[in-house]
Image (cartoon, helix red, strand yellow):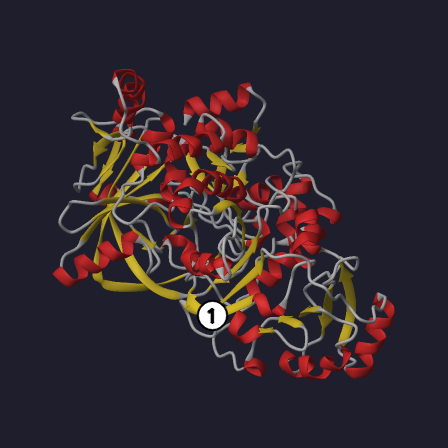
Amino acid sequence: MDAWLERLEREGHLRVIEEPCDVDLEIAHAAYLEVKKPDSKVLLFKRPVNREKGIEYDMPVVMNMFANFEITEKIFGRHPDAIAAEIGELLHMKPPQGFMEKLSLLPRLFALKNVFPKRLKHKGLCQQVVKSGAQVDLDELPILKTWSEDGGPFITMGQVYTRSLDGTMQNLGMYRLQQYSKNRLGMHWQIHKDASHFFDQYKEAGRKMPVTVAIGGDPLYIWCGQAPLPHGMFELLLYGFVRGENARLVKSLTNDIWIPEDADIVIEGEVDPEEMVIEGPFGDHTGYYTLKEPYPVMTVTAITMKENPVYQATVVGKPPLEDKYMGWGTERIFLPLLKTTAPDLIDYHMPENGVFHNLILGKMEPHYKGHAKQFMHAFWGVGQMSFVKHAIFVGKEAPELSDYETLTEHILNRLDAKNLLITEGIVDALDHSSPETLVGGKLGVDCTGGEVAEGVKEPMDDAALLAAMRAIDEKVKGVKQYFTHTKNPVAVVAYEKERCVQGLFDDLAALRDHLKVLVVVDAGCNDIENPYMLVWRVANNLDAQRDVRKAPFIMLDATDKNELDGYTREWPGDVVCDPEVLADLKKRGIVAFDDELLKKFYI
């Protein structure tokens, strides 16, 4: 970590903040605004404090370590596409023919020796300072509260190391951890994660589960923790492949879990499978709060650290954020592995305002009728891709998947309700739109064919369309049409909802000659002139089985759901910064912003 911070400062990527900043909202809010800038930097807060508890911490806090594309590429050591190419070569390696081919293969095979972690016999840098038993005090760490309605402070960049009951598998995951007291942490490993599977093994055996959490060290560790590797594969194997050198591990002092020797801070403990405690709320990477739910608890047995540690943290919420750049690396590097399941896949892309698992774009080379639908089922059946809610596939002649304007035109000129696939599958535990947890609607859109023949029969401008809609329902407060030059213009409606939107759909069917795609959002919390955040809202709020109609034209209900819709779960609020905290940070010169930035990203 020290070497990285020195390099970042030397190369102009680090901003050092000497002014005291509170772990309660201030540090997180400053980082949240910074990473939304096009030239965002890594932030190092030298003097974190907790004014409520009267604490001045003796370690700095680093935020936004993955602050932009350039820094992220430096952390990987090369462009993610280069790493993907190396993986692709390994996947397609063939037995060498002849002596010279065997010789040419040796350097590649020799490099693979760096993949496997190396277990050291001595203590690591992370164990220079040791506190155990009654000395354990999590309040000595500058653990952040990132959002006003959070249930408390959370460790947000924890590398959570666990192992299977029989000791044959070790896992590294990135899960949030809520601080309850001086020695207790909530373990938010979701039901689909490897750590949760290990937890089930310990529970069935009636044994406590060892857990070690590392913070800091090489920034690549935490990226590996969120990488979608197959079940049973230790994520630090990926570290060795990307870095080209072995991960150097030391044994935890109070359990048998091995962790990186250069971590800044290590928290060791155990989880009692019989104890569950309410965790949350927490403002999550969807931009919404995840609600209170029971999760396991870790009792801390020891805290070790370097002599001069740096506490690494992140803030999640509405896009764009640090996970944009971490996700970019994941997307590029795992393309070759995804192609093993879908060999005619050319490329894929997860827009950050689709919150990654909520929207995926795929380019493919279709060879037969229904090929794109086959791809949809393949995606929904593969690892973390199974959490994807909405998938749009285009053919090989389509524009680059990150060229959003041109790509959207291409999609809308090929969009046909007959080629929408609506089904059901598992959804992320963080998803709030589905009628029940963990299971919800999926939408697949096949735009791999040619242009559709018909467009809107009788186009209207926005003013005329709004008047026509208000004649039907005066609660329609605004209309904005996008891509009116395509075969399928998108009409976004701001609606003051007092009834189920399905009833509005019934009534607006009378306007079938004037509409092709209709999207309805709540008037009070959306700007229909802001397409970036509209994509974020729609991708979050849709459950395809409940909210998508295909006739007489395509209609999407992206409003917040409640009892009017037969929705019985608690609908969460979306995260917003505390205006008083922002104003104070601005007054002290820690952040700079204007109203345009606040409005642009619903801050």
Secondary element at tag 1: strand
Do we see residue 367 in this rendering? yes
> In terms of depth relative to the viewer, which is nearer, 184 or 32?
32
Q: In what quadrant of the picture does the N terminus appear?
A: top left
The percent coordinates of residue 19 (x first, y second) are: 57, 33
Which residue does the numbered mark 1 point to in the structure image? Answer: 423
Q: Is residue 348 left or right of residue 212?
A: right
Q: Is residue 418 above or below residue 20?
A: below
> In terms of depth relative to the viewer, which is nearer, 244 or 271?
244
| Residue drawn at 74 percent across, 61 percent down | 487
Do we see residue 46 in this rendering? no
The percent coordinates of residue 310 (x first, y second) are: 41, 32
| Residue drawn at 56 percent across, 77 percent down | 562
> In terms of depth relative to the viewer, which is nearer, 173 or 261?
173
Q: Is residue 364 above or below residue 447?
A: above
| Residue drawn at 72 percent across, 60 percent down | 527
Label 1 Cα crowd, 10 Å radius (few <14 / some 14-19 / many 20+): some
The percent coordinates of residue 409 (x first, y second) are: 70, 53
Q: Is residue 79 left or right of residue 270?
A: right
| Residue drawn at 49 percent across, 21 percent down | 7
Quadrant hosting residue 268: top left
Q: Is residue 158 left or right of residue 61?
A: left
Q: Is residue 18 above or below residue 519?
A: above
Amino acid tagged 1: Thr
Quadrant hosting residue 542: bottom right
Q: How many marks?
A: 1
